Image: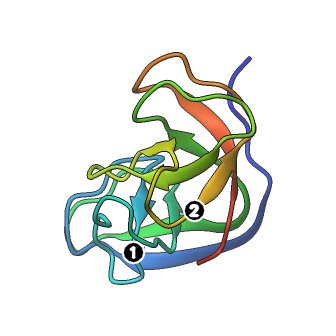
Amino acid sequence: MAAAATKILTLSVVATAALLANRAVTAAGAVPAAGARCLGFTDFPAAINERVSVGAMGTVVAEAGAALAVGAALELDASGRVITKSSGVAVGHALAAATAAGQLIEILVIPN
């Protein structure tokens, strides 16, 4: 089944870097550092100076950076993908499992 999303809050930012769909973004429009905070997850790709919508509350579709289990607490890798939390800031919880990097899953966003 395809990943779905139920957004409660969608914001927008102007990209200050090339952004890919379903990856984390900062309020400044950049890709966050590994383990860092984020505003939310992009709905579509954006080039520098383009505006992009960002799912900031509720559930969103996010790209996995590695295999992860349902219910896992999530943090970000250096590419803005979600991975199982180890030492970074929790940005969400997995509502579906991923068996490999690159898979799109639904996550519950933790505003931070």
**Quarter that holds the C terminus:** bottom right
Indicate the quadrant where residue 2 lies.
top right
Q: What kind of residue is marked 2?
A: Val
Which tag is nearer the camera, tag 2 or tag 1? Answer: 2
Q: Residue at x 40, y 35 (%)?
A: 65
Q: Nearer the viewer, residue 4 or 81?
A: 81
Q: Percent position (x, y) of residue 15?
A: 29, 72
Q: What kind of residue is marked 1?
A: Thr
Residue 29 as seen in the image, left or right of residue 3: left
Query: Relative to 13, is 75 above or below?
Result: above
Q: CA distance from mark 2 to mark 1?
A: 12 Å
Q: Nearer the viewer, residue 105 or 42?
A: 105
Indicate the quadrant where residue 26 lies.
bottom left
Q: Percent position (x, y) of residue 86?
A: 47, 50
Please rate how many residues cluster around mark 2, counting C-alpha atoms within 10 Å: few if below 14, some from 14 to 19, many from 20: many
Indicate the quadrant where residue 27 lies.
bottom left
Helix, strand or loop status at disc 2: loop
Q: Percent position (x, y) of residue 21?
A: 42, 47
Query: Relative to 28, is 23 above or below?
Result: above
**Quarter that holds the N terminus:** top right
Q: Is the C-beta separation of discs 2 and 1 under 8 Å?
A: no
Q: Nearer the viewer, residue 52 or 25?
A: 25
Q: Which residue is mark 2?
A: 91
Q: Percent position (x, y) of residue 17?
A: 19, 67
Helix, strand or loop status at disc 1: loop
Q: Which residue is mark 1?
A: 26
**Residue 37, numbered label:** none
Query: Relative to 81, is 101 above or below?
Result: above
Please rate how many residues cluster around mark 1, counting C-alpha atoms within 10 Å: few if below 14, some from 14 to 19, many from 20: many
Q: Residue at x 57, y 23 (%)?
A: 98
